[in-house]
Amino acid sequence: MPERNDGVGQALLRLRDVGKTFSNGVTALDRVNMTIRQGDFVSLLGPSGCGKSTALRLIAGLSIPTLGMLEWNRPLGDDHIGFVFQEPTLLPWASVFDNVWLPLRLRGISRKEAAAAVSELLERVHLTGFENAVPRELSGGMKMRVSIARGLVTRPRVLLMDEPFAALDEITRFKLNDDLLELWQEQRFTVIFVTHSVFESVFLSNRIVVMAARPGRVYEEVVVDASYPRDEAFRTSPEYAALCRKTSDVLMHAISATSGVSNGSR
Ligand code: ADP
Ligand code: MG
C-alpha cells in the first residue's frame, strides 16, 4: 500500500504555529507546525516534557492553544475522535462488554442496539469470550485491548493514543503493536500515537514527528519508508534496524538541542 508511505492522503488536520503556554508560565509548545493526512499513522516521539501529551490534548479539543490554530479539513463531530490513554481507565465494576459499550451508551444507544458493534470490536481485539469479565480479572494487555475497543466503538476518524503500551512488557507490546496495525489497515482510521520508544515508533508509523523540549517543539520529521503490512519479518529485518538507527540519531540530536543540556550549563 504505497499511499500509506508517500502520504497522498488528503490533509485532515494542520497545526499552524501552535503554541501553548500554561498559566504558570511554562511554554509546553512553541510554534508547532504539522500536517496530519487522512490514513496517516503518525508518531510523536520525544523526551519526557517535550509537549507530546499537550499536543494530543489540543488535537482532542481538551485544551485550546494560546497561539496559532488547528485547521481541520472539515468540521469534526464529537464522535470523530477516539482517545486511548496510557492507563486503560476502565470502570472497575463494569464488565468488558459494558466498558466498551460506554461511549455509545453516553450517546443514548441501548445495550441491545450496541451489541453487534461491541461484539465485533471485541472479536477484533481478540477478547471474544471475555465479555462478562471485570477489569480485575484481566491482564494489563487485555485491559489495554478493552481500552482500544472502547476508543474505536464510535468508529472515530482519528484515534489518539498517548503512550498506550508504555506500561506493558515487551512481548505483550509487540502483540498489541501487530494487532493495532492490523486494525488500522482494515478500518482505515488515522492514528496519532505518542511514544518515547524509537523502536515502537518505527515499527508502527509512516511518519515520525521528533520533538525537542524546553520549549516543546518539532525538531524534525522522519519518513518511515517501509511498506505495510509490517510483521515479524519486518521487525527482524536490516531495513527496520537501519530505520531505527536513523530515527535514534535524530532523537539524540533533538535531546541535545534541549536548552541547558547542549551547552553544558545544566
Ligand atoms: P510529554 O507528554 O511530552 O511528557 P507534556 O505535554 O505532558 O509533555 O508537558 C510539556 C510541558 O508542559 C512539561 O514541562 C509539563 O510540566 C508542562 N505542563 C503540562 N501540563 C501542564 C499544566 N496543566 N500546567 C502547567 N504545566 C504543564
Ligand atoms: Mg505525556
Image (cartoon, rainbow, N blue to C red):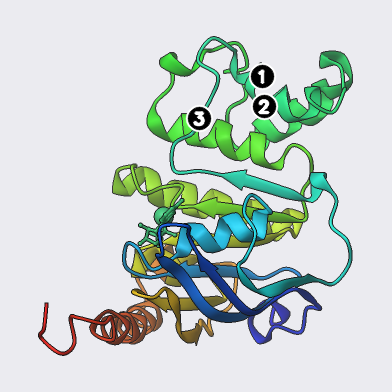
| Secondary structure at numbered mark 3 | loop
Callout 3 amino acid:
Thr
Q: Nearer the viewer, residue 218 or 111?
A: 218
**In the rendering, which numbered label is found on residue 100?**
2
- The quarter of the image that holds ligand 1 is bottom left
> Which quarter of the rendering shows the N terminus?
bottom right
Q: Nearer the viewer, residue 65 or 170?
A: 65
Q: What's the residue at 62%, 24% (across, down)?
A: 128
Near mark 2 (Cα within 10 A), the count class, few <14, some 14-19 or many ≥20, is many
Residue for badge 3: 89
- The residues bearing labels 1 and 3 have C-alpha atoms spaced at a distance of 15 Å
In this image, 253 relative to 130: left or right?
A: left
User: Is the residue under label 3 in contact with that under label 2 (CB below 8 Å)?
Assistant: no
Depth order, front residue of 90/174: 90
- Residue tagged 1: 97
Is 194 left, or right, of 160 in this rendering? left
Q: Position of residue 254 (x, y in %)?
A: 32, 83
Labels 1 & 2 near each other (Cβ < 8 A): yes
